[in-house]
Amino acid sequence: MSYLEYHAKSTPRGLRKILYLNWPLTLLLASVAGVGFLMLYSVAGGSFSPWAEPQFKRFLLGMSVMLVVAMVPIWFWRNISILAYLISVVLLLAVEFFGTVGMGAQRWIDLGFMRLQPSELMKITSVMLLAAYYDWLPPERSSRPLWVLLPVLMILFPTFLVLRQPDLGTSILLMAAGGGVMFLAGVHWAYFAAVIAAAVGVVTAVFQSRGSDWQLLKDYQYRRIDTFLDPSQDPLGAGYHITQSKIALGSGGWSGRGYMQGTQSRLNFLPEKHTDFIFTTLAEEFGFIGGITLLSLYILIIVFCVATALAARDRFSSLVTLGVAITFFLFFAVNMSMVMGLAPVVGVPLPLVSYGGSAMLVLLAAFGLVQSANIHRPR
Amino acid sequence: MKRNSQELEGAHRKLSRRALLLGGLQLGFAGALAARMRYLQVDQADQFRLLAEENRINIRLLAPARGEIFDRNGLSLAQNSPSYRIILVPEDAGDVEQVIAKLSQLITLPPEDIERARTEISRNRPFLPITLADQLNWEDISKVAVNAPALPGITPEVGLTRLYPQKDDFAHVVGYVGPVSDYDLSKLEAPDPILRIPRFQIGKVGFEAKREDKLRGTAGAKRIEVNAGGRVMRELDRREGEPGADMQLTVDADLQNYTQARLGTESAAVVVVDCDTGDLRAIASAPSFDPNLFVRGISVADYSLLTEDPYRPLANKTVQGTYPPGSTFKMVTVMAALEEGLIGPGETVWCPGHLEVSGRRFHCWKRAGHGHVDLNTSLKQSCDVYYYDLAIKVGIDKISAMANRLGLGIRHDLPMSAVASGLAPNREWKSRVRGQDWLVGDTVNASIGQGFILASPLQLAVMTARLATGRSIAPRLIKSIDGVEQPSGAGESLDLNENNLRMVRRGMYSVSNDRRGTGYRSRIIAEGMRMGGKSGTSQVRNITAAERAAGVISNKDLPWERRDHALYVCFAPFDKPKYAISVIVEHGGGGSKAAAPIARDVMLQALYDGTPPLEAYPKGDRSRIKAQQERLERERIKRAQNQDSDRA
């Protein structure tokens, strides 16, 4: 009987659980989503369709999912982690065979009422499985090679599947989040040093392999890297995204052009203005102040997650909460770096703001786990 | 698995430590993001804002209205008339082929236009408008407008195009405009961006080309907001261009029309100069062509018809054409001699019909000779030997200098295409250009306007005006620009001895009014309107000794292109010269026969400012003249009707 189960009786029960929801976190999530509706309304030229309204419906659905997940005791989620992980892997494999081709990559399964992106689901279930694994694994064994290899495989297998789609952004997220959980679980830092050294080697190999028969990335990915390094090379071609994004962002200035006054997004200079590049619209219309505000909201969410994790009394709760926080952080950090020209354009949405159903639902479900950890903390 | 709580506590502390470490890293990264945001949005905001404006705003030029051209009485010679065209936006049309098919049922679309449109459609983005049909009339455009609901993506549009209501009569004066060609652009170092406006028209030939700078105006501009695809979202503001300057010419359209009509199908040219101001009252070159053909883009068939015509309708013979002036040059020779004091009063020269110069025999046109010839008779009867003799005494350099003073061999600055400078040769010219010494025989030839001497009808008219007034008359074509009167061409005194001028003028008077004068048959008998004139017949071939022995073939037995040019210059009224006229009929035969009647008719028309009374003509001519006047009047009415129907 674990420590958690021992104290199960002291956790809130029934509807009382609602009182123990992390309300500040819920409000923060709602306000970030609110920023999203605002921006989707604006990029549609002052219209609820085609983006703001469906996004709002998905948000309501997502909030309900979060509440349901939150009400269910955290140990239940720990117990089904492996099942959730396996389902995700099966879905990823299904995408491999039955996926709908969209945007040049096989990422979706059409469920009829929505398109499910299993790679989104994978981000959470892999974190759950890792957390459960380290909850189960005695801490003193966590740095032993065999016990390190197992979670590494848990991470790399889905990463490999996602990379095959191909979805570089999600692959990086999966690896980074998984690595983060392993680090938190106490795996010896020497492993991480080794991985970083290996990563440097891989990057070198990736560049060295370019143009040869065993080229590791697709040509468009190389071009994205090239134009990331020097966007001015081809401002109307491959560098277009980054150049236009920076123009829109920079022209926002201190306080922005005003809501619905952004010319660059309105006139379609911005690519993917409602999805990956929605931050530029925000930054153009609300300026530096708007951008910093959103960034602060994100940081606050992370802070509340970390606080929840530190207060938790069992490893699963801590690890899953921090894993969700890391995933969330990676989402917005990579997205913002990308639109500000600090990272290659890899196709990572701005969490809770970018238009997209799977990401929103999965993220809110993940925050449901955080809420559940908070509610079912022994007091 | 049972764990002791100590171990768990340790693991938990480690987790908390690492969580805080990671949290700190995340915070640091967020700080970096914020710094980057600040760099882009605050430090570099101005630069990016500029780039954003450039992204967003496109400037489109607006074609200015071209300056209009009027005759001296305000009659329109070149105007901007609305022209209708049909614009197709493929994106709005949906099924483009179907729309084109429907449209061809309504109006006739030339297959080549449709083909061109199809290529444009396939090449352009679907929201960019393309011109489907151009230069449509009101009737066609109405049909399209009425059926607009059935023709998605089709819009009728109105633009301005150049129209020359006077058609052929002013083709050589005004010239014409046409679309800007790559060749036009290549000639310019820094072409005005306005020239890149699709279907912009610029002056190609004649006045339109020479005064392009003033007529064109300056472009307006509109700033439009475009999206990344180049689609126009809205117009931000608009600044209309400056229209080109309106030009009033010195030409009198009525006189010009009459002159062109009088020349008919002859290959001929007439220049009428106002002796007071140098105004070109008429400057007609026949045959002519319709400049409107060129505005629309002339068809190959029409164009080759014009270029292959031996009468060269495209050439502006008044200023481009240079001809040996023949006997009309004799005034120059005699003026040179008079100014040198080489002709004593009553002095005569014996004309036996020829003159032997350095072993070569130069003939007078009259084989029997004129006997004793004085100055007056020499002009009146156009005795050649008199001038051979005179020229040898004066020398070519003096003659050439006099020719220049009288306006020959120099280029008159007129805003017309290819204004020729003609040639009044001297010793220096021959050694420079030909590398040969000047021979006495050259002087002899030059004395009667043959040999190297070349003059355009314009120059001959100017020469006549200068002789008639003694002033340095300069031809003037532009009366006013935008209402501002241009300087007159009245000129300074030529500093010629008035007595000498009077002697020459008396001679010219005799040509026209003395029973034995060469121009007597084409005289004016109305008192106060009498003219002074001089005929000229210039050879375009050498008559060899053998030919002469066999008997010179008369002009009418020769093929057209080998016949003599007929020339006549005159001024009137004799006492107070108002107009000076030169006429050349290419290969027309004798000047007194072919050119003088035209000169007289045009002169009377100018003097009376309309159809002259028959009383101005000699009695014997009146019935013929009456018939001619009636015929020309009928033609005039017919043309006026045609013009009206064109405009409707």
Image (cartoon, rainbow, N blue to C red):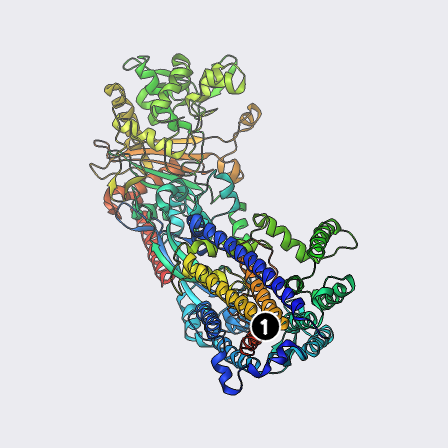
Q: Could you tell me residue A152's position as x and y percent?
A: 73, 64
For the N terminus of chain B, which image quadrant?
A: bottom right
In front: A332, or B354? A332
Q: Position of residue A112 (x, y in %)?
A: 62, 83
Please name the residue shown 66% across and 61% down the image: A183
Furthest residue to the bottom?
A14
Image position of B34 with respect to B389: above or below: below
Give the camera-side residue of B586 and B144. B144
User: Which is more toward the observer, A182 or A231?
Assistant: A182
Q: Which of the 4 quarters of the picture holds residue A97?
A: bottom right
Where does the image place residue B302, in percent across and percent down from the top left?
52, 53
Mark 1 residue type: Arg
Q: Identify which residue, A155 or B174, lies in the foreground.
A: A155
- Residue B453 visible within the image: yes
For the question of whether residue B84 can be seen, the reply is no
Disc 1 chain ID: A
Q: Is residue B496 left or right of residue A263?
A: left
Query: Could you say which quadrant of the image residue B500 lies in?
Result: top left
Taking A257 as reference, is A133 left or right? right
Residue hosting label 1: A313
